[in-house]
Amino acid sequence: MKRDDFSWMIGGVQGSGVDTSANVFARAAAAGGLHVFGKREYYSNIKGEHSYFQVRVSKDLIRSHVDTVDMLATFEEETIFRHALEVRSEGAIIYDPSQDNKRLDQVSTIEAQVEAALNAELSKAGLSADVRGIIELARRRGVHIYPIPYDDLLKTIGSKHGESSLSTLQRMLNVLAVAASYALLSFDEELVKDAVRKQFRSKPKVAEMNAFAVEATYDFMQGKYAGSFAHKLSPIKFEGPRLYVRGNSMVAMAKELAGCRLQTYYPITPASDESEYLEAHAEMQLDGSAAQENPQLGEVAAMQTKGNIVVVQSEDEIAAITMAIGGGIVGVRSSTSTSGPGFSLMAEGMGYAGMNEVPVVVTLYSRGGPSTGLPTRHEQGDLRFALHAGHGEFPRLVLASGDLEEAFYDTVRAFNYSERYQTPVIHIVDKALANSDGTLPMLDVTRVKIDRGEFRREITDAVNGEYERFKHTPNGISPRPPVGTKGGVYWLTGDEHTELGHISEDPTNRDYMMEKRMGKIPLADKEIPISDRANFFGPENADITVVSWGSTKGAILDAMEWLKQDGITVNFLQLRLINPFPTEYVTQIFSKAKKIVGIEMNYSGQLIGIVRERTCIPVEQLVVKYNGRPMSSEELYDALKLIHGGDAPNRIVLKHGA
Amino acid sequence: MALKLSDLKTTAHNDWCPGCGDFGILNAVQMALAEMNVDPSNTVVVSGVGCSSKAPHFIKTYGVHTLHGRSVPFATGIKLANPNMEVVIEGGDGDGLGIGAGHFVNSGRRNIDMLYIIHDNEVYGLTKGQAAPTLGLGVKTKSLPSPNINQGINPLLLAIASGYTWVARGYSYDVRHLKDLIIKGIRHKGYAFLDVLQPCPTYNDIQTKEYWAGEGHLDAAGKMQPRTYKLEDTGYDGVVHNHDEAEMEQKVQQAVLKSFEFGDRTPIGVFYQNEFVSTYEDRLAVRTPSYKTNPPAAQEIARPDGTPLTNINKLLDELRVA
């Protein structure tokens, strides 16, 4: 397997600016035309625990992370202890030699199991259990070691900028680590300085001092280590504007574009970032409004060129879902964003929306469960729950996005389906996507269309002032003038109800209403084109057919490329719309499959269970992972290779991750 | 065209027990809406689940009969998305102060311009007479196997503590007085709470219509003394008249003290009113000025051909790296 990319990692104490440095690193690479994929791992903690950020860069499109680390940038001991042995032979570690005497047993935040394993390795090698020992072990494994006396460097920078406080200067450690990395890679210094200036653009003085720190670090590194590291990174020519985005903000932007105007949430990781983004961008520009086309309409009309989204932080997730449904009731595209524990509280509200045919979108950020589970880690354990949450039977559509771009377009689809079929839609976005960053070409907003289905702005056919909201229609979808529409009134109730919305326990009415609501899923199944429901990658005939969903997409596609180089052909069916399930299409794909492999980030293989339920086709070979860390393309490559060799157990559990 | 009381009645079958206090509250709501000449299609009554929460079906405005305990967050979503609508919430004491207590308290922090009426009969009627959160410790209503083991909540005290800016109590058989309170509550700029004493003839055999009329509570001459009295008749003034912290504090304290009076002399009327607190809608308009003139329900989001109207170029620019 030949990798044509570079994997860089930075770690540090949570709250010490690890994110900032990763952002600077990624932005500099992206500005040089390189493709970037970044993965953030952190504890459920505010300050003090270890967090790390892995950034992969390449000339070509990349969609996943790898386990191998080509360069590890550190400025404290815990990152060295935790990650030094992940660095490949011929890779590099940047570290501060003043840490040499720090002992492993002094790092209270390292788990006992991790400490014991490291102690064993070090003692086997006859090395001391401190930074000096582990650095020596890495060196023996062929890793290049680059000691950098950060404090000396900081003092030099400080004296030039008239800053003598070491604690102030130490805030630049992150940038020093980034600059040292790029200097070793002989990457364009100006691009790094630009990225630093952009990162600190709101504080010009800080920006300049940091830009100078880049310069000083480059000088130091070139003076001491020029030409010592073989791998080089250079900017490449590329076309068009490019974005560097994170999953949460992709969803948020798409919500604004889709016309979502009420977002409710109760704080929960990893969903809240999306709502906070929306609140920070709550007022927006509306195009093509009457005022722009006819300026003499005056000041009030000019206000119509501004739109706004109401973002409400609710008292709990029960309030979040019911408030959002309230917005849907008055005809406003509304959504709530949550994660497993919050979604559990929303189950009853989901049923109300189903019963009353109210459009509402739930963005479900999937994290490790059950209960509080692994709150900041990744898992795809909620698919079954998303399909069934709530008592009784009501229709819902369930969408799952596979990458950052899909998260954007699927968000708009979620609102369209929700209004077209007048029922709740659950959009699953994995934690691995929510907290992944990547470069993308500029999004094509002209691809986006808004479909409001049978939404109406007026009532003209009320009888005696009363309007039949749940009127009989051939396909079960009734016109939907929202509550508040002039010309009539109607009722909603969680009880079974008549066409007017009054309570009814009449058996004939019950049959009609159940059939009206439940008929929406077959209707959606008929109407939604397969291209919006599933992706198929690779050759029609292949040695292995992979079936998966959600954020595993990137790792699978990257692994497929490598397997192709080994002469192993793989095709991949990615399911995006899980309900309604594309039964015929899946059956047809599987009828040509030689060996079907289910790949999922959960224990039980939830999707392949659903596949079996809908198609009666058993998928006997499963690759799963549930340790909270996303699958890497390397792990999948190894697993698929093993399966191809014919000696694999039916169930392969992937274990990598720190 | 003036709205008549009959215009607000529906033909939906009403299955409340004969003599239920809900009827008085329903009449008072309809009278208030008629007197205010509201536009029925711009008015919505939102309720939870329970006997009293069936009320919207009998009122010919929009009616949203929601989930048990959730009337307030549903109404919150409705009002914030369409602030031009008149929103009245109705529900029982179990609905609002038991299962929905979290919403009761937290909605007080928002001060959304809505009226919340609680039908307070101290029992869960629809599930056959269990103790509701307002029932006092040791009280044994008809269908309880043993006296109530919990203390009762003081809804007025809780509302004041939670930040409601208009707090009042009415009595379901004093329909005219109740109607006036409902009008005041709807007109109040901010979040209004109206607790209504309501006999449950089937399950509450303690606080009956006769109890409130003064049965067993006689003056020296042997005449029945009603157990309710009107605050306004005593010169009580719960209104904050000036934008002044000290005055507000004094009125809150006065209302708190008054809220403890219950039993033989139970006050009805306005306990507290303060219009100097910004509404949630005002606060949203500070965050997004266009909220006032172009709230969510008024915004068009797409052209007829489905092209979105929202321009996200600025957001995309923020994320551009090259």
Image (cartoon, coloured by chain):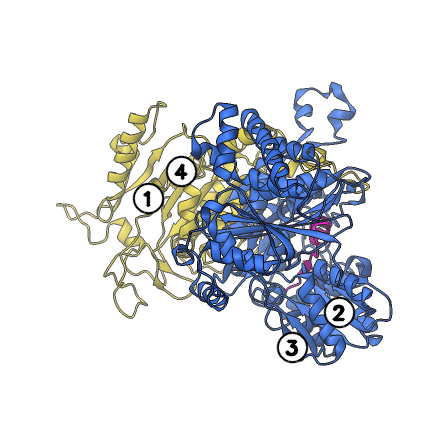
Chain colours: A blue, B yellow
Q: Which residues are magenta?
A: A394-420
Residue under pointer 2: A546
Which residue shows up at 61% across the image and 48% down it? A335
Q: Which mark is residue B156?
A: 1
Q: Quickly name the residue at label 4.
A: B181
> What is the secondary structure assignment of the residue under circle 2?
strand
Distance of label 3 from label 2 (alpha carbons): 14 Å
Q: Residues within 10 Å of mark 2 (few under 14, many from 20)?
A: many
Amino acid type, mark 1: Leu
Please tell me whether residue A411 belongs to the stretch shown in magenta. yes
Mark-to-mark CA distance, 3 and 4 = 68 Å
User: In this orientation, does residue B13 appear?
Assistant: no
Label 2 close to label 4 by CB (< 8 Å): no
**Magenta: main secondary structure:** helix
Q: Residue at x 44, y 66 (%)?
A: A116
For badge 2, the amino acid type reads: Val
- Disc 2 and disc 4 on one polypeptide chain: no
> Which residue does the numbered mark 3 point to in the structure image?
A651
Residue A164 relative to residue A4: left or right: left
Q: Could you say which is closer to the camera, residue A230 or residue A162?
A: A230
Q: Nearer the viewer, residue A206 or A74?
A: A74
